Amino acid sequence: MKNDCVFCAIAEAEIPSFKVYEDELVLAYLDINPFTKGHTLVIPKVHSTGLLDTSDETLAAVLARVKKIAAHLKKALPCDGFNILQNNGAAAGQTVMHLHFHIVPRYGQEEITFVSHTGDMKALKALAEQLRF
Ligand code: AMP
Ligand code: ZN
């Protein structure tokens, strides 16, 4: 398998996928461990690891495809909405190190949540000052 990347292998049809959409730049296929019915992954065919090592041009083009595919899924499934997820790094839950966007159709019943906590306004102010650029 080229560069040991399972998504490159899918892009080159070396291993099978449940393909939903393909064009010259991207491939979209069903996630084999779906959060919900219709959970789809969108990848660029050219390998990059994540958001930060992908060119702005490629990112813009891939995101336009994510929009197009999400619009199609929203019509084709009886879902009420969808989440776009894109994990960067193992600490963020990335398990396949080839850039991919998750489109997760939502039907209103699922429990998929990030847990938030009430922010400390003083700490937020200081953090924004530290981070602002
Ligand atoms: P992430 O945690 O963002 O790296 O997501 C990787 C996703 O790829 C997971 O949701 C896996 O279920 C999915 N996945 C891994 N291998 C395959 C495969 N061969 N075909 C489709 N989806 C896959
Ligand atoms: Zn790859």
Image: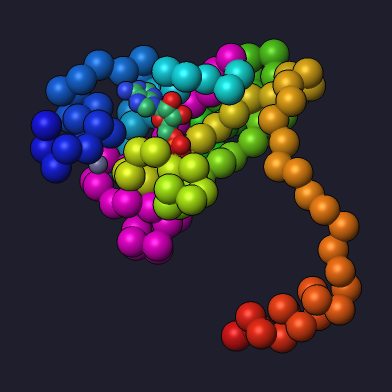
The answer to whether residue 103 is above or below residue 20 is below
**Residue 34 appears at what percent x and percent y?**
52, 20
Tell me what residue is drawn at x 79 percent, y 21 percent: 108
Magenta-drawn segment = 37-64
| Quadrant of the frame with the C terminus | bottom right
- Please state the quadrant of the image where ligand 2 appears: top left
Q: Nearer the viewer, residue 84 or 27?
A: 84
Q: Is residue 52 visible?
A: yes
Tell me what residue is drawn at x 59 percent, y 40 percent: 84
Asked if residue 60 lies in the magenta stretch, the reply is: yes
Q: Nearer the viewer, residue 73 or 7?
A: 7
**Residue 119 appears at what percent x and percent y?**
85, 63
| Quadrant of the frame with the N terminus | top left
- Residue 60, picture quadrant: bottom left
The answer to whether residue 70 is above or below residue 50 is above
The answer to whether residue 127 is above or below residue 120 is below
Tell me what residue is drawn at x 25 percent, y 16 percent: 16
